[in-house]
Image (cartoon, coloured by chain):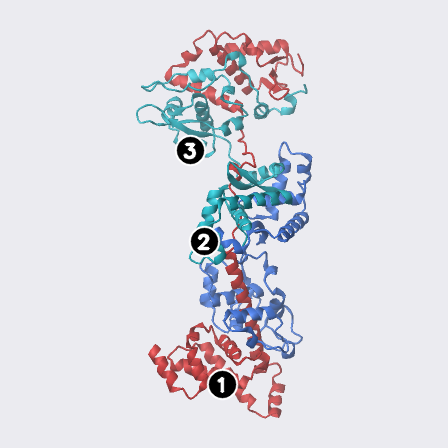
Chain colours: A cyan, B red, C blue
């Protein structure tokens, strides 16, 4: 059995990108199996250089085959990926399976607080919203909109949360400094923990004159949600 | 039990065939039924099913059944039925040919020899089919489906967007501020300026009514404080929510234009008008 | 964009096997997207026949490319799978496949009869195997490989049995037509006898001189499995 084909079958079946190191571990594990045959055992000690060369050869072969996918090496790990031009159909594939439900009002409010106050602890969020946010936080984390970003320097060192890159993408924001009226919500005082909260650190404080809603996608949807056809709202300019 | 088998095998040593069967005693349990045993016996004889000597086959079968009994093995009813069929075939074979023909003439198509061979051939085909299925079964164990990482996390597809916009987010901000203000009495910290949201609503409606359309940023140009910006913004959101105003963006990342909603009354400055 | 390549990228990225119906749904959904381009929209109404033909062409291409994987259709759904000879390494990567215990010889024989002769009554199965099949039938039903499919129009209206979709999946078959030597094994029950010479309806009544063991390959396998040489088993006739 050719090393190249074996590596191909592994990368083809793997759920995640595999590094040369990981691939060599699999080869070693296969060789260590009780019923391993001679050719399986012979690959136990495949050298790093051999594996890399085989992978590069594989990548060239797939490039030449010009199919809808190719073998890519990203950050040292190898993975089969689809060609970008198939994105419209792949989006539809994902959509067919699991269209995420619309965010609930509690989720939106919680998200807004986290967005403006990050890094923020769960207790602080609850203080502003006045209710327990466990369930909502979990939803937001599962949806990849919110993530744990560190720990607050207060008693108990609770986890702090912030928004993700996906959050910016969802709302069409270039960065957190794009959040409208950021300062005001950030300034909203709550009972401060004993130590100074680091909420404002690292966040931009856009002056009012720079405030602008620059997100086209968001806007169209807003117009839709107001019950008006978007077409009538935006005359050709 | 094993000792008994040995003894039985020794006792019937006179028959080379039976001695051979004793060697294969392990097969007893494998024979799923009389047809299975018959196919086994035919195979031992190294003849084709069509060429098998049924008389001889009957003898061997019955010997085998006897052997099973010797070994105290339970003989299933199916084996006994087959044994009687074979005895019948054997007895017929012993008759002169002309008498055989007469019997066949009486019951056309009921020739037990033919019926047995047909059954054996058919069963044999399904045994072969079972072997092929077994090979497929083993093969499937060796086949691994490609289960790629979930697309949502992959680099190839964009994550599906939730059905919300930045306006939903800002509305949420509004709600939070208002509720927080009510609860904590802290609204003053934000709204302690001379401005109120309702004043700003008036202001925006005036500007829009007077000019037909106004740029988003223009609404904020005169704002003296951040809280005034917030009031203006909240007022704008409220007007959009009430469907008094709509906003449009001519080009991506261009400024947003605020205008009166087409159906909003009174239609002071209705109709698309570019400044 | 070619339909074939799009289907390939979808099957390449899917988490589970996809049927033609599901693939067509994805095509339709992609076309319904707001920003769908002309070529995406043009595939919204791809006919079932077109999709099937494209899939079969794809499967042929992958077969010809002889890589470590292929495109397989099992129980009407398409999926990329690895070739069996890479199993030692894939087991090292993803672990042993979770599968129910292998079927016994009696179970396989009974299943074969049901698969080829369905719909078939228990009595007919017993007639062919020459033994009672109650226990085996129960096992097959419990494992979901066989199910009751109706009742025979004979005295007593006994239940008839057939194989399930799981049966196809378990053996990696595309459909019942994919069963090896299907024609030969079905023929006996399908063809009406020239004259009704036996009492058992639905069983073979071919005159002896027409009976022939035509499936040499199957025979060889049968001989192999019993550990005996095939040569002695079926002499050249």
Q: Secondary structure at mark 2?
A: helix
Tag of residue A31: 2
The chain ID associated with circle 2 is A
Q: Which residue is mark 1?
A: B59
Placement of B155 over or under B50, stated as above or below: above
Frontmost of labels 2 and 3 is 2
User: Same chain, marks 1 and 3?
Assistant: no
The chain ID associated with circle 1 is B
Q: Indicate which disc, 2 or 3, sits on the residue closer to the N terminus.
A: 2
Q: Secondary structure at mark 1?
A: helix
Frontmost of labels 1 and 3 is 1
Q: Which residue is mark 3?
A: A138
Q: What separation in Å lies between label 1 and label 3 (alpha carbons)?
A: 78 Å
Point out residue B82 in the picture as x, y percentages from the top left corner: 49, 80
Placement of C41 over or under B6, stated as above or below: above
Q: Quadrant of the C terminus of chain C?
A: bottom right
Residue drawn at point x = 46 percent, y = 23 percent? A115
Residue drawn at point x = 50 percent, y = 65 percent? C108
Q: Nearer the viewer, residue B205 or B125?
A: B125
Point out residue A191 in the picture as x, y percentages from the top left corner: 34, 18
Mark 2 in CB contact with mark 1 (< 8 angstroms): no
Q: Secondary structure at mark 3?
A: helix
The chain ID associated with circle 3 is A
Examine the image and state in which quarter residue C34 appears. Answer: top right
């Amino acid at each position: 059995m050719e090393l190249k084909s074996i590596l191909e079958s592994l990368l083809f079946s793997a759920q995640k990108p595999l590094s040369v190191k990981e691939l060599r571990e699999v080869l070693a594990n296969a060789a260590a199996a009780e019923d391993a045959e001679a050719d399986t055992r012979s690959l136990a000690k495949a050298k790093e250089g051999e594996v890399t060369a085989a992978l590069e050869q594989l990548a060239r072969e797939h490039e030449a085959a010009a199919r809808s996918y190719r073998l890519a090496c990203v950050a040292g790990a190898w993975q089969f990926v689809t060609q970008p031009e198939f994105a419209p159909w792949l989006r539809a594939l994902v959509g067919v399976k699991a269209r995420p439900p619309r965010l609930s009002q509690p989720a939106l409010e919680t998200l807004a607080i986290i967005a403006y106050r990050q890094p923020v602890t769960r207790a602080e969020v609850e203080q502003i919203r006045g209710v327990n946010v466990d369930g909502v936080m979990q939803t937001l984390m599962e949806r990849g909109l919110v993530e744990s970003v560190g720990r607050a320097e207060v008693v108990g060192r609770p986890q702090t949360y912030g928004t993700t890159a996906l959050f910016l993408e969802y709302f069409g924001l270039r960065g957190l400094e794009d959040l409208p009226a950021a300062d005001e919500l950030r300034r909203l005082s709550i009972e401060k923990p004993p130590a100074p909260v680091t909420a404002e650190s690292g966040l931009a404080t856009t002056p009012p004159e720079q405030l602008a809603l620059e997100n086209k996608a968001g806007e169209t949807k807003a117009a839709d949600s107001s019950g008006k056809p978007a077409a009538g709202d935006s005359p050709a300019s | 039990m094993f000792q008994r088998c040995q003894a039985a095998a020794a006792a019937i040593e006179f028959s080379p065939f039976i001695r051979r069967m004793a060697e294969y005693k392990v097969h007893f349990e494998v024979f799923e039924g009389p047809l299975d045993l018959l196919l086994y016996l035919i195979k031992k004889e190294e003849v084709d099913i069509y060429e098998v000597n049924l008389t001889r086959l009957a003898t061997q079968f019955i010997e085998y059944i006897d052997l099973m009994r010797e070994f105290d093995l339970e003989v299933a009813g199916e084996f006994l039925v087959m044994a009687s069929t074979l005895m019948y075939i054997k007895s017929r074979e012993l008759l002169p040919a002309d008498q055989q023909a007469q019997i066949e003439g009486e019951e056309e198509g009921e020739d037990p020899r033919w019926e047995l061979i047909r059954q054996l051939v058919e069963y044999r085909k399904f045994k072969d089919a079972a072997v092929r299925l077994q090979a497929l079964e083993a093969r499937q164990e060796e086949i691994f489906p490609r289960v790629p990482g979930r697309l949502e996390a992959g680099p190839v597809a964009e994550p599906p967007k939730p059905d919300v916009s930045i306006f939903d987010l800002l509305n949420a901000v509004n709600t939070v501020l208002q509720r927080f203000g009510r609860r904590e009495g802290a609204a003053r910290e934000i709204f302690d300026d001379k401005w109120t949201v309702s004043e700003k609503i008036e202001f925006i409606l005036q500007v829009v009514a007077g000019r037909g359309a106004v740029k988003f940023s223009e609404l904020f140009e005169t704002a003296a404080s951040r809280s005034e910006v917030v009031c203006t913004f909240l007022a704008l959101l409220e007007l959009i929510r009430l469907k008094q105003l709509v906003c449009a963006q001519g080009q991506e990342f261009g400024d947003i234009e605020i205008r009166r909603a087409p159906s909003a009354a009174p239609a002071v400055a209705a109709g698309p008008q570019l400044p």
